[in-house]
Image (cartoon, helix red, strand yellow):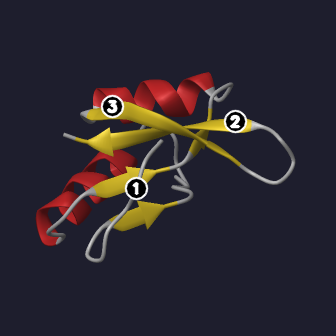
Amino acid sequence: DVTTNIGDYIIHQIVAKNKGTGEAVKVIKEYFEHVYGNVYLTVRAENVPANKFYQKIGMERVGYINWSNGNYYKIPNRY
């Protein structure tokens, strides 16, 4: 589905200490300002709150990944 290249970034998890404070939005937007290249993020398809958050900050699904246990994960991408 998705091929990454040298210079692309892959995030496997974002953890917010205080949910609902806007802290995670601030941190991820600052991160985007300092990276040059595509940013890929793996997240479980059934993790609805996380998927809503990633869509809210402008990420979009570009493919699926299959981990060794057979579960599929969405890969949103910064546009």
Return the residue at label 3.
60
Q: Callout 2: helix, strand or loop?
A: strand
Residue drawn at point x = 25 percent, y = 64 percent:
31
Mark 1 vs 2, N-terminal side: 1
State the residue at coordinates (55%, 59%). 12
Quadrant of the image occupied by residue 74 = top right
Camera-nearest label, 1 or 2: 1
Q: Amino acid at mark 3?
A: Glu
Give the x, y percent position of residue 29. Answer: 21, 53
> Whole-percent x and y of residue 57?
27, 36
Q: Foreground residue, 45 or 29?
A: 45
Pick the residue in front: 30 or 66: 66
Label 1, on which residue? 3
Residue 1 lies, in percent from the top left, at 48, 41
Q: Amino acid at mark 1?
A: Thr
Q: Quadrant of the C terminus?
A: top left
Q: Nearer the viewer, residue 32 or 65?
A: 65
| Label 1 Cα neighbours within 10 Å, binned few <14 / some 14-19 / many ≥20 | few
Residue 60 seen in render:
yes
Does 14 appear above or below 35? above
Q: CA distance from mark 1 to mark 2?
A: 16 Å
Mark 3 or mark 1, earlier in chain: 1
**Horizontal and vertical percent for residue 61?**
40, 31
Q: Which mark is residue 72?
A: 2
